[in-house]
Image (cartoon, rainbow, N blue to C red):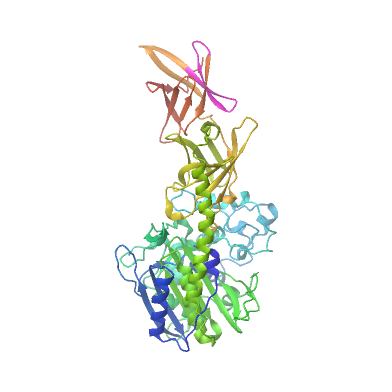
């Protein structure tokens, strides 16, 4: 899934788009753009005028999408987060200008000035000074064990790419922090607050936030292109990241959301009830962060930027309010033209869904804007193929180079070890079947073999290939040729920005203190003998106390060490609490750690 593709504005027009023409448009786009399923809804002048599902919820089960099929709406959740904060601001429980550290004392940015001045609106406007997708690797791929505490403390370790409040760079982690602000200010979890204060009042009966999603009987399955075929993949578990992208919804319910937005927060039969004030509605639709304006003459746009949870621009003199959402295999868009009292929502269950919503949403909008037929479905299909071809050239060259270098002999022991990044934690490079292997301690799906590429660089092909996020790992070496650090970058030009491997600063962490100490064994009943484990010159050393002999070991994995000259293995055991309790020597003698022994 490409960020550029998701943000790509596209149009195609028929004189008047009847429901039949919309059906034809979407069904054609599903085939040409290789999308498994989609759902489309249109609201106009306060009414739902089109609401329908297309294609399949899963290419495996062949069940069909309908207007009630739930999709993960990903970053389209962000507007719900800003609406929730608006409600709390209306109730006097917080102010937009409140400092985040006053709400969350543990929050800490990359310098003291930014920490002291970072307010609630700064969480929502993508102008923090951090780079694109900074820290997303905590949650991409899913399955990691990072906590809210980790998120709140992580920002101090990121290196800014621009001055505070000067430049747009999309950010997910700060919306997760916004969710925690909502939880603490309201006394409810983020999920419960949004469900009770927004989703239930709007009678979005089949919409659920994060952990509250229970009914999976009509749920779209995500799809990705794996080896050239559209295949189902595991759904991303957003976990505690609900405020950035955790809502499940369908086009029938999202129509109600768009109607409330177009009515400036008012809802119900008589529009006398409001979710939030007109003042805060205007605040959400006010330009906070300026972006480069789209200069395509077809649209004659004069401004472009980000509000609070919404992108804002003008198209042919009409305000356009929109947002996109993307998780692996789940891509969506909400687009509104308040001046036309028009709203369009498109939900898809494929990585290529950004191409479909660009073509379909733009086509529908153009029929109201009076623009001619621009043939965007075909144009985007051609552009996608061009992008794929360009990406394939790059990735093919990398793996061809890997294949040609297979006979190069690599001293695995120079690279094996534990490496640590201050926000991402520890990773391990170890040997498996005589081959180097990479694994993250905190994100289990980041696990795979390392193939020599060139010099001190290795290509990693993750075991979980649905990520489409293979990387190059570049080691720096000391004067003895031993690896000291790792920098990483994606191989494919189309890697999703949330795989921010480039932000990692992995430094060797050969800390063997946990292994150090005395271990006892009885060669004869009733008589303890001891070995001593120490750290010496960044290596683990075993001392035979009865003769003073020292044996130096290389680390093969977290708990396994080896001395090649003596063919001498050590295998340590950890308790459930993580403490080293014993060591198996020469695969036969089990020496137990004695923390009380004093020679």
Judging depth in this view, the residue of 589 and 465 nearest the camera is 465
Magenta residues (range): 531-548
- For the question of whether residue 250 can be seen, the reply is no
Tell whether position 370 is magenta.
no
Q: Residue at x 44, y 25 (%)?
A: 570
Tell whether position 539 is magenta.
yes
Relative placement, left or right, of 304 versus 452 is right
Relative to residue 316, is residue 137 depicted above or below? Answer: above
Q: Quadrant of residue 371?
A: bottom right
Judging depth in this view, the residue of 428 and 25 nearest the camera is 25
Q: Residue at x 43, y 28 (%)?
A: 572
Q: Quadrant of residue 453?
A: top right
Q: Quadrant of residue 330?
A: bottom left
- For the question of whether residue 162 can be seen, the reply is yes
Point out residue 475 in the picture as x, y percentages from the top left corner.
59, 40
Point out residue 552 in the picture as x, y percentages from the top left corner.
53, 22
Point out residue 109 in the picture as x, y percentages from the top left corner.
63, 53
Judging depth in this view, the residue of 316 and 198 nearest the camera is 316
Relative placement, left or right, of 501 versus 116 is left
Point out residue 203 in the picture as x, y percentages from the top left corner.
39, 75
Q: How many marks?
A: 0
Relative to residue 530, is residue 238 depicted above or below? Answer: below
Q: Main secondary structure of the magenta part?
A: strand
């Amino acid at each position: 899934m490409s960020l550029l593709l998701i943000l790509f504005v596209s149009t195609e027009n028929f004189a008047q788009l009847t429901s039949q023409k919309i059906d034809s448009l979407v069904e054609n786009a599903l085939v040409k753009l290789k999308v498994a399923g989609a759902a489309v809804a249109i609201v106009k002048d306060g009414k739902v005028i089109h609401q329908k599902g297309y294609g399949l919820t899963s290419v495996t089960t062949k069940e069909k999408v309908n207007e009630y099929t739930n999709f993960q709406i990903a970053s389209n959740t962000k507007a719900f987060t800003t609406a929730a904060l608006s409600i709390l601001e209306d109730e006097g429980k917080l102010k937009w200008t409140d400092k985040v550290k006053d709400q969350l004392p543990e929050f800490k940015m990359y310098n003291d000035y930014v920490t002291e001045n970072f307010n609630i609106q700064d969480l929502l406007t993508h102008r923090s000074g951090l780079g694109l997708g900074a820290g997303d690797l905590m949650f991409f791929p899913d399955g990691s064990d990072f906590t809210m505490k980790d998120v709140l403390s992580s920002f101090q370790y990121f290196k800014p790419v621009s001055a505070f409040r000067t430049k747009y760079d999309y950010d997910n982690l700060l919306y997760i922090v916004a969710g925690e602000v909502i939880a603490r200010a309201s006394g409810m979890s983020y999920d419960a607050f949004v469900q009770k204060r927004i989703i239930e009042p709007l009678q979005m009966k089949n919409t659920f936030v994060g952990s509250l999603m229970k009914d999976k009987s009509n749920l779209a399955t995500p799809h990705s292109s794996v080896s050239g075929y559209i295949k189902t993949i595991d759904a991303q578990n957003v976990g505690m990241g609900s405020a950035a992208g955790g809502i499940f919804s369908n086009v029938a319910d999202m129509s109600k959301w768009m109607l409330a937005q177009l009515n400036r927060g008012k809802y119900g039969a008589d529009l006398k009830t409001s979710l939030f004030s007109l003042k805060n509605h205007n605040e959400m639709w006010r330009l906070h962060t300026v972006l480069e304006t789209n200069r395509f003459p077809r649209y004659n746009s004069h401004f472009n930027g980000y509000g609070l949870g919404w992108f804002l621009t003008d198209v042919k003199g009409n305000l356009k309010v929109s947002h996109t959402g993307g998780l692996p295999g789940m891509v969506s868009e909400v687009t509104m033209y308040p001046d036309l009292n028009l709203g369009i929502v498109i939900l898809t269950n494929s990585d290529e869904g950004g191409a479909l919503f660009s073509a379909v949403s733009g086509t529908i909008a153009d029929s109201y804007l009076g623009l001619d037929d621009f043939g965007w479905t075909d144009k985007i299909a051609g552009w996608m193929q061009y992008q794929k071809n360009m990406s394939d050239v790059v990735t093919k060259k990398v793996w061809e180079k890997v294949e040609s270098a297979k006979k190069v002999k690599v001293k695995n022991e120079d690279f094996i070890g534990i490496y640590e990044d201050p926000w991402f934690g520890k990773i391990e490079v170890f040997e498996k079947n005589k081959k180097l292997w990479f694994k993250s301690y905190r994100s289990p799906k980041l696990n795979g073999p390392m193939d020599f590429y060139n010099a001190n660089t290795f290509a990693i092909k993750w075991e979980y290939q649905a990520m489409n996020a293979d990387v190059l790992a570049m080691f720096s070496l000391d004067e003895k040729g031993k690896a000291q650090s790792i920098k990483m970058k994606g191989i494919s030009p189309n890697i999703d920005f949330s795989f921010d491997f480039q932000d990692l600063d992995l430094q060797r962490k050969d800390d063997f203190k946990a292994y150090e100490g005395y271990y006892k064994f009885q060669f004869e009943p009733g008589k303890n003998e001891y070995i001593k484990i120490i750290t010496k010159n960044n290596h683990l050393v075993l001392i035979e106390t009865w003769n003073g002999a020292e044996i130096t070991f290389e680390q093969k994995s977290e708990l396994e060490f080896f001395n090649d000259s003596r063919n001498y293995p050590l295998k340590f055991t950890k308790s459930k609490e993580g403490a080293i309790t014993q060591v198996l020597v020469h695969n036969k003698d089990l020496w137990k750690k004695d923390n009380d022994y004093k020679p």
